[in-house]
Image: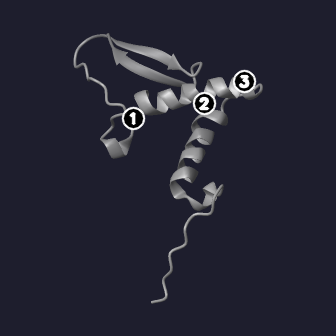
Amino acid sequence: MGIRDRPTSPHSPWQNGYAERLIGSIRRECLDHVVVFGERHLRHVLPSYMKYHNEIRTHLSLEKDAPVSRAVKLAGTILCRPVLGGLHHQYVRS
């Protein structure tokens, strides 16, 4: 059939669907809504978003769980905690 494997070129994230999806999520969910005041501020914002994405944000492919699994409380008062300065919110039971 003439099909050949073509490995991803180094330093070419547009050729890697996983990297492209991650970069797009970071841009759409975080950086499009935050004014970055420099490299130092960006180095603060990105780890905060990474923590939100891995520990708080639900993922449909994980059956609405986060990559870092957490315990589910079934009773208690629901509290809203702002994440990334109120850009996103975490809802937890106390």
Q: Is mark 1 on a helix, strand or loop?
A: loop
In the rendered image, which residue does mark 3 sit on?
A: 40
Q: Which amino acid does label 2 sit on?
A: Leu
The location of residue 92, given as percent across then percent down, is 36, 17
Q: Do the residues labelled 2 and 1 touch (CB within 8 Å)?
A: no
Q: Do the residues labelled 3 and 2 touch (CB within 8 Å)?
A: no
Q: What residue type is labelled 1?
A: Thr
Task: For marks 3 and 1, give the one nearer the viewer.
Answer: 3
In the rendered image, which residue does mark 1 sit on?
A: 58
Decide if residue 66 is on the left or right side of residue 4. Answer: left
Which numbered dot is residue 46? 2
For the residues labelled 3 and 2, the Cα–Cα distance comes to 10 Å
For the residues labelled 2 and 1, the Cα–Cα distance comes to 18 Å
Image point (57%, 63%), residue name: 8
Q: What residue type is labelled 3?
A: Arg
The location of residue 56, given as percent across then percent down, is 42, 27
Whether residue 74 is situated above or below residue 94 in the rendered picture: below
